[in-house]
Amino acid sequence: MPIDKIFKDDASEEKGERARMASFIGAMAVADLVKSTLGPKGMDKILQSTGRGHSVTVTNDGATILKSLHIDNPAAKVLVDISKVQDDEVGDGTTSVVVLAGELLREAEKLVTSKIHPMTIIAGYRMAAECARDALLKRVIDNKENAEKFRSDLMKIAMTTLCSKILSQDKEHFAEMAVDAVLRLKGSTNLEAIQIIKKPGGSLRDSFLDEGFILDKKIGIGQPKRIENAKILVANTAMDTDKVKIYGARVRVDSMTKVAEIEGAEKEKMKDKVNKILAHGINCFVNRQLIYNFPEELFADAGVLAIEHADFEGIERLGLVTGGEIASTFDNPESVKLGHCKLIEEIMIGEDKLIHFSGVEMGQACSIVLRGASHHVLDEAERSLHDALCVLSQTVNDSRVLLGGGWPEMVMAKEVDELARKTAGKKSHAIEAFSRALVAIPTTIADNAGLDSAELVAQLRAEHHTEGCNAGIDVISGAVGDMEERGIYEAFKVKQAVLLSATEAAEMILRVDEIITCAPRRREDRM
C-alpha cells in the first residue's frame, strides 16, 4: 500500500517547501492588496457583495476590507485575523499591521531560500522586535501633566488618523469633534457612550457634536413637546395588554358581553400598571416595547411624555447617560433609579424629527450627528471617525505619543541595524531583514503618493543618523520634512501593537512546514 493512501481520497497535503511557498505567497498577496490604502494618499477599495441586494461598501479601512474577503489560503487568514484584532484593540493601524507582516515574510522567504533555518529567523525577529520597541520607548513624548499640550497632541493624533480617510478634507472639524467626545469620557474606553447618528443629506461639513443625547424617535400625538427638568423612567416592559389579542388567545365565552368584561378587566390591569408607573413621579417614560393607544392616552392625560420602541442600544445608552436604570417591575418606586435631564425637546435634522435630551447627568455621553451625500459616504465616515475615537480613547489612558509619517519605522530600523552589526552568527541576517521590512512602511507611504520612494527613504536614513532628528516623509510637499512642525503624531500604543502583532503573525506563518487540507464530508458516508 503506497504511503500517500493514509488520507482519504480528497484530502491533500503540501509538504516542506511547497507548503511554505503557499503560505508566503498567500500572505504577501493579502499584504499587497491593502498596501495601496496606506498613508494620506492611499486609495479606497469598493467591495461588492454577491449576496442579496449586492450591497456596495467603499472603504479605506484595512480591517473592513480584509473582513469582507473570503480567503482560502490559511496563512492569509492569519493576517486577516491580526488586522481584526488590531481594529478591536486600538482601532487604527489595521493596514500597517498587515503590510509589516507581509514584508517580514517577504524578507524571510529570501532568507529561507539561502538556507537559513526558520527557527533561526524567528529568533532573530524576536530580538529585533524587542530592540525596536525599546528604541521607541526611548523616544516617546508624554504631555499628560500639561492639559493644553495634551489636548493639542490629541488633536494632532486625530488629524493624522483622519488624514488617510474620507474625512481628510475637513479633518480639523472632525478631529475637534472626536477629541471633545473622547475627553468627555474622562478616561473610560467605553465608546458606547458616544452615539453616532447618520442622516443622509447636507455635506460632511454639516456634521456636529451634541453634548446631549439624541434618540431617533418621534414624540407621540397629544403629548407635551417640551419638558423641562425631566425625570425619566427607562423601562423594558409590555404595555400592550389592554386588549384581548385575537391571535393566540383562546377564550370560551357564551356571549359577547363576557368578552367585553374580560376586556374591561384587562383595561383595569393596564390602568393599575400605568398608575404604578406614574407613582414614580416621572414626566417622561421611555419604553423599549410598544405602547398601545389606551396607556398612551393615560400618559398623555397625566402630562407624561411616553416614548415607545426605543431600540435596545438607544435605551441602554439613555440609561447610561441620564443615570437611570432600566426597570421592568414597578411595585416599589423607591428602589428604582430615575434618570434626570434638564430639557427634552424635539429637533429637526434634515427631514427627520428626533428627540433631544440636553443637560444630562453624566457629562460623559454625547451624540455625533454625521451628515453626508449618501449612505456609502456616511458609512465610511462613521468607520473613520470610529477609528479616530478608538485611538484617542486609548491615548487618553496611555498618553505616550510618537511622531508619525514613517518616523517611528526609521528610528526602529536604525536601532535594529545596529543590533544586527553587534550580533554574531546567522541571526544577524534575520535582524537585518527585520530592519528592511520596517523601512517598507515609509516606502509604501511614498509609493502611494507617487513619489520616488527609493530616493526619499535613502534621504530619511541619512537624516536619521543625526541624533534627535524628526524627519519623516511629508507627502503633501513630496519631500522629507520635519514631522514635529507638520504636527503629524501617532499614538505609541498603536505602533507597539502593530510591531508586536506583525512579528507574531509572521513568526506563526514561518513555523509552518506542512498544510493538510481535509476532505469535505460526503453525504453517502452516513448511510
Image: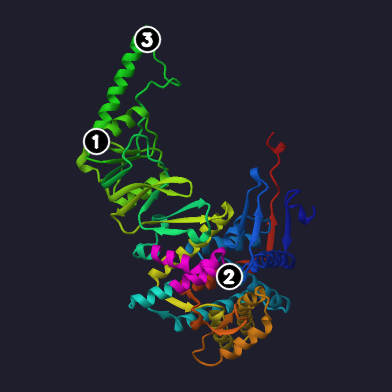
Mark closer to the chain start, 3 or 1: 3
The image quarter containing residue 232 is top left
Label 3, residues with CA under 10 Å away: few <14, some 14-19, many ≥20: few
Q: Residue at x 38, y 69 (%)?
A: 397
When asked about the image quadrant of residue 226, the answer is top left
Q: Which residue is mark 3?
A: 256
The image quadrant that residue 422 belongs to is bottom right
Disc 1 element? helix
Q: Position of residue 435 (x, y in %)?
A: 60, 81
Q: Position of residue 175 (x, y in %)?
A: 46, 67
Q: Is residue 248 above or below residue 68?
A: above
- Can you tell which mark lies on residue 96? 2
Q: Amino acid at mark 2?
A: Ser
| C-alpha gap between disc 2 and disc 1 | 56 Å
Determine whether, in the image, residue 506 is placed left or right of residue 235.
right
Q: Which residue is mark 1?
A: 278
The answer to which of marks 3 and 2 sits earlier in the sequence is 2
| One can see residue 14 in this view | yes
As drawn, the residue found furthest toward the top would be 254
Q: What residue type is disc 3 on?
A: Met
Residue positioned most to the bottom: 466
Q: CA distance from mark 3 to mark 2?
A: 73 Å
The image shows residue 423 at horizontal and vertical percentages of 58, 87
Q: Say few, some or many: other residues with alpha carbon within 10 Å of mark 1 (under 14 / 14 to 19 / 20 or more).
A: many
> Which is nearer the eye, 515 or 50?
50
Q: Amino acid at mark 1?
A: Leu
- Where does the magenta region start and end? 155-181
